[in-house]
Image (spheres, rainbow, N blue to C red):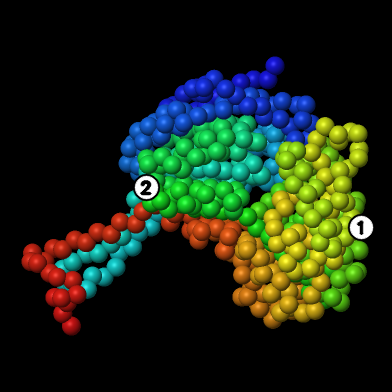
Amino acid sequence: MADNFKNFIAGEWVAPASGAYFENRNPADWNDVIGCFPRSGPDDVARAIASAKRGFAAWSRTPAPIRGQVLQRVGELLVLRKEAIAQAMTREMGKVLAETRGDVQEGIDTAFYAASEGRRLFGRVVPSELRNKWAMAYRRPIGVAGLITPFNFPMAIPTWKMFPALACGNAVIFKPAEDVPHTAHLLVEILVEAGLPPEVIQLVHGQGSVVGRALVEHPDVPVISFTGSTETGAVIGAACGRLHKRLSLEMGGKNAMIVMEDADLDLALDGVLWGAFGTTGQRCTATSRLILHEKIHDTFLRSVCDRAGQLRLGPGLDPKTEVGPLIHEEARKKVEYYVGVGKEQGASVAIGGAEPGDKALAAGWFYRPTVLAGVQPGMRVEQEEIFGPVLSVLKVSDLAEAIRVNNDVHYGLSSSIYTRNVNSAFRAMEDLDTGITYVNAPTIGAEAHLPFGGVKQTGNGHREGGWAVYDFYSEIKVVYVDYSGKLQRAQIDTEA
């Protein structure tokens, strides 16, 4: 009998008001039930918001360096439990242990970075235009932040959002993806153990259409951060615009890796395999398109297919596995659908394009790494996010055409170019219309101390990670102190 897990609301682990639960299953073996988690409703969200408001009242007045010390302890506990969390995460999400260890490490890095920012939440003091007057700006917490996170990075993405929000003095309501509730539970246990005041963090499990919607539409949650599909992000954006909420959206990608004729092809081959098939292609930064210069197209395509065909599928807990399962049946059906669409529109399956056919993998949502050749600009498999182990290959004649093809999609998250030509590298850095560009590396590999995000339909202008995210989770207040002892009128009484 699977364990029933609980929400964390008002400083206690509590059952959902409805008494309803949903199952969390292992995508590598759907018969393996990890646990049952609360199918929460609006009543649970309302209780969480009321508690978070109380938590905010105290936490926002806690000195920022002290807030940083709590996050430092969170990072230390994550270090101690890194392997156990990685094992649990692989079981519920599917990706291989090397990747879930990296996922936890990103949470560790983010915790230590946020801890240091507790002493670096800088304001500015600037000269006033008037005599005997002081002018400055400083950061203030905003309030309760609702965080809605996806399944593919169960530790990294929640911590990207949560730790800066906490460092800035906000309270947090955490709504994790229904597919990865156990990792969320383990994270909140660590936060409480590290000494975070209990009402500062609320964990509410459940469906996005219920719990997420209630968070987005509640007037007492002024900040929303969402990572997920562009379609859902558009709905959230409309609601937050109507309610005048601060909103950060990190949504889809259709990222391309360009390989020029002068590239180190062995290096590029390693890069595209990792970029396209790491996390089974379930990354918003996944290398979904491969743009090849015509002079190396045929040779490089053969090499990609040879290596992709050798990748070992299996459960992520098996040390021999290189590619794990998709997250659930619907995800695999989506991949199958897009492979069919590609063939209908004239692309050919160069390798993969099917379930593995291995009885040992029949209980999981596995799909063979797939390469689609002969893809043309404008095809749906070249334009739309698939979120699976499918790589679309295009041929171009020069760098200018490669850049045009890269830019001619609705998304703008990540891009990559492999070349030995410094002029080509700098041209790509300048002209590729994405929030992130890699030179001689794949489209994945963000580091926690740099901003992360994209342009066009990938986001709404905010960034996660690095220093930029602290601007999102804080308000800037300007203060003027006039000690002249008389009325001074700005722009009117200014002396030359």
Q: Residue at x 77, y 30 (%)?
A: 30
Where in the figure is residue 127, as x and y percent of width and height? Answer: 26, 70
Q: Which mark is residue 10?
A: none
Depth check, front residue: 243 or 15 = 243
Task: Choose top left, top right, bottom left or bottom right for residue 258.
Answer: bottom right
Vertical arrangement, residue 444 with respect to residue 317, above or below: below
Depth check, front residue: 302 or 141 = 302
- Determine the secondary structure under disc 2: loop
Residue at the outermost front position:
344
Please indicate whether residue 122 sits to the left or right of residue 188 in the image.
left
Q: Amino acid at mark 2?
A: Ile
Please indicate whether residue 175 sits to the left or right of residue 277 in the image.
left
Q: Which residue is mark 1?
A: 306
Please indicate whether residue 450 sits to the left or right of residue 439 in the image.
left
Where in the figure is residue 129, as x and y percent of width and height? Answer: 22, 73
Vertical arrangement, residue 414 with respect to residue 493, above or below: above
Residue 139 in view here: yes
Vertical arrangement, residue 93 with respect to residue 439, above or below: above
Q: CA distance from mark 2 to mark 1?
A: 53 Å
Q: Which residue is mark 2?
A: 142
Q: Residue at x 72, y 64 (%)?
A: 256
Please indicate whether residue 65 sits to the left or right of residue 304 in the image.
left
Depth check, front residue: 19 or 172 = 19
Q: How many marks?
A: 2
Sort mark 1 into few (<14), some (14-19) or many (20+) by Cα contacts within 10 Å.
few
Q: Residue at x 52, y 49 (%)?
A: 235
Residue at the outermost left position:
486
Label pair 2/1, CB-CB below 8 angstroms: no
Residue 277 in view here: no
Q: Amino acid at mark 1?
A: Asp
Q: Residue at x 47, y 37 (%)?
A: 214
